[in-house]
Amino acid sequence: MNNYKISKLQVTNFRNLNPDIITFSSGINCIIGENGNGKTNILEAINVLATKKSFRKNTSFPQFLSIDGGKPEIIFSSVVENDDNGPVSYTSKMTNDNVLWFLDGAPIKRKLDIKVVFINPFDSYGFHNSASDRREWLDYFLSQLDDQYKKNLAKYTLALRFRNTLLNKKPSRFKEQVLAGDVELAQLSFHLTKKRVEFLEALEPLIGETFQSLFSEKHNLKINLDSRIIGMSAENIQKLFANNLETDCDRGHTSYGPHKDDYVLLFDGLNSFDFCSLGQQKMSYLSLLFAYIELFRYKYMSYPIVLIDDVSGELDQHRWRRLVEYLEKREFQVLITTANEKFKEELDRISGANNIHIKNGSLVH
Ligand SMILES: Nc1ncnc2c1ncn2[C@@H]1O[C@H](COP(=O)(O)OP(=O)(O)OP(=O)(O)O)[C@@H](O)[C@H]1O
């Protein structure tokens, strides 16, 4: 069981946050403050503590380190607990070169397996507008559920990069090397595609159900894998690579494979990008994410910590209320931020929510 929840956090030298001790409840936590005061930084600190990485793109230690920080070291001190263990103090010390972890003050070799899901308002645009964002989305979430998929994806990415370098640079006897490497590339392609299909099949019944319980509207939501190699054996994928080798040589890159897959979200049978309003796209996207969280629970018998950065945009007040009511009925720990006064009023209706007010990186009591 790794259903960790976080009950306290104190960060030193992380972005604009002051080292205040922030206390979280195991249910809903609303982080409230005006723009640019550090709400997202709190979510980011938890994400970095749990995964070593940010959810912001291309960010690492130099960006994390407070511009006012004296020492080039960031300390994330927390208290976490799960069903198996009582509260433990868990600390991560990060420098430009390494990260160290401590459990109840003693060093540990590997970080704790704290699972988090971050929900970003802007990802809905990316998801509906860009095939590579959709692929990244599916790869990220599927990797969280399936370690073997994650490893195979890393191997595939390396093998594909090597193939493309050969196709591009064309060293002597490169075609023989390409064909030899295609055996592994085809097997990996087969496994990745199979896992993607299984993931979407498992997710599909949950998406419509989630949409219904989130927004009280019945819509048929379906997510399809659009792949040239779907249903093909590894041998046939290898043949496809070989048959296309001359074209790939001309282009200098590989034309077929899981890196070319796309996913289509169908809303009542129509492509959500072409057909849905921005609000409907956001609702579909949120349904997809919360469906994933349910799938996560089936797999791990526990929930991740759910970090939600201001999702109020594009949704009307009625949908805000539905979303808040949905969150109220969940068992997972939620940290939700907002700068929107009206949305804050909806959040205020949640009985027992823990309100955290933040101004200039400090807690306001
Ligand atoms: N390395 C850093 N050192 C100090 N301050 C930083 C650093 N990186 C970012 N900041 C500051 O953090 C603030 C942004 O914080 P954050 O993104 O958490 O805001 P927010 O409260 O979520 O705002 P919004 O409601 O606009 O999303 C900005 O004022 C920015 O200047």
Image (cartoon, helix red, strand yellow):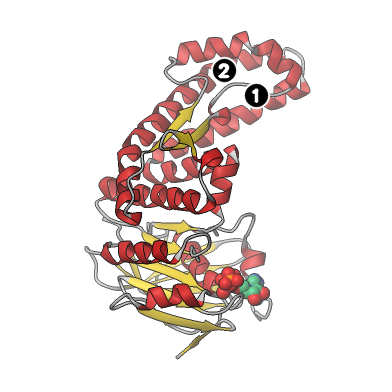
Residue 359 higher or lower than 264, as above or below: below
Residue at figure coordinates x 44%, y 76% from the top left: 344
User: Any mark on residue 182, and which?
Assistant: 2
Q: Is mark 2 within 8 Å of ligand 1?
A: no
Circle 1: element type? helix
Residue at figure coordinates x 62%, y 64% from the top left: 61
Residue 204 higher or lower than 75, as above or below: above
In this picture, residue 233 sits left or right of residue 154: left
Q: Return the residue nearer the eye: 287 or 305.
A: 287
User: Any mark on residue 163, and which?
Assistant: 1
Residue at figure coordinates x 54%, y 22% from the top left: 185
Residue 103 higher or lower than 216, as above or below: below
User: Where residue 181 sits in the image (x, y, percent)?
Assistant: 58, 19
User: Where residue 9 sits in the image (x, y, percent)?
Assistant: 43, 76
Q: Residues within 10 Å of mark 1 (few under 14, many from 20)?
A: many
Quarter of image, ligand 1: bottom right
Residue 177 higher or lower than 55, as above or below: above
Name the outermost residue toward the bottom. Answer: 365
